[in-house]
Image (tube, helix red, strand yellow):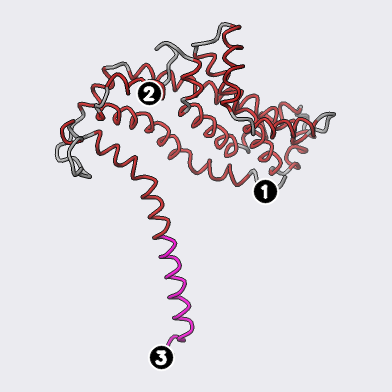
Amino acid sequence: MSFVPEAPASTAWRKRVMARRLGRLAVNGAIALLALFPILWGLSSSLKPSAQIAEYPPSLLPRTVTFEHYLRVFNDNVGHYIFNSALVSTGAVALCLIVGALGGYALARFSFRGRGVMMVMTVAIMSIPIASLLVPTFTTLSTIGLIDTRLGLILLYAAYQLPIVIWMLYGYFLSLPIEIEQAARIDGCSPYRTLRKVVLPLSRPGLVAAALFVLVFSWNDFVVAVTMTSSEQARTLPVAIYFYLGFYGREWGPLLAASIISIIPIIGVFIVLQRYFMSGLTGGGVKG
């Protein structure tokens, strides 16, 4: 049996492919490290004693690990603010998904007068800066007695994010084969039952993607929350961290600990639902 050496051209091609892959991996790794560095630095510093945080030159890793800053933050009622943020974010997500699913399905599957105008208005509303709506929304909430309440924040966050949820679910519903819905109609399902029993189970990735958009916005929002709340009763975690700046002064340990606490829930939710999130984003762009 004779040995046939590998063609030089094939070897060179494989080397070029490997070099391109390594190059992309290096670039992606550098970008990821650059994006994660502030979070990793904050986590490392939050575990350092106060004296070590102020050292120059700074050290990347703590020589002595301490949880005193986290204990201090939890003793300062941070659990109440976490509860407020979780309640407000969950309420906004639920409201957006309920109304957004109905609106997106109606736009995707039904023809009615004014449908085109509604679609244009949905896109136009998404382009309005939230800051420009703060004064009228503040006046409205004050009039109806919802200022400085968690219910007021839920309604505001849902109203701000509802257009993008409708648009995302509209695109995802369009990507689903309509033959499945037609089969359900033949079996006697009403449009609402078809949506609830057939369309929504198939649209789980799209629903998760829309929910994460609303969740991240509601959890991280500062401008709306600081404008619409004035007491600790309805204050959310980002606003509490802002007030910690004055409460703790230049004590960076508790501030960094509070910041790390604020991002852990969102990172955890994203890790668990990442698969649905990515397929939900790509699924809505199949056809439109």
Badge number at residue 3: 3
- Membership of 24 in magenta stretch: yes
Measure the alpha-carbon separation of dots 2 and 1.
42 Å
- Residue 252 horizontal side relative to residue 273, left or right: left
The relative height of residue 231 versus residue 22 in the rendered view (above or below) is above
Neighbor class of circle 1 (other Cα within 10 Å; few <14, some 14-19, many 20+) is few
Disc 1 and disc 3 in contact, CB within 8 angstroms: no
Badge number at residue 286: 1
Split into 4 quadrants, where in the image is the C terminus? Answer: top right
Under circle 1, the secondary element is loop
- Membership of 217 in magenta stretch: no
Residue type for callout 3: Phe
Based on the displayed image, in which of its 4 quarters is residue 28 positioned?
A: bottom left
Measure the alpha-carbon separation of dots 1 and 3.
49 Å
Residue with the mark numbered 2? 242
Residue type for callout 2: Tyr
Please tell me which of labels 2 and 1 falls first in the chain. 2
Measure the alpha-carbon separation of dots 2 and 3.
72 Å
Q: Residue drawn at (40%, 50%), measured in percent from left and top?
A: 32
Q: Residue drawn at (29%, 41%), measured in percent from left and top?
A: 41
Q: Which residues are magenta?
A: 1-25
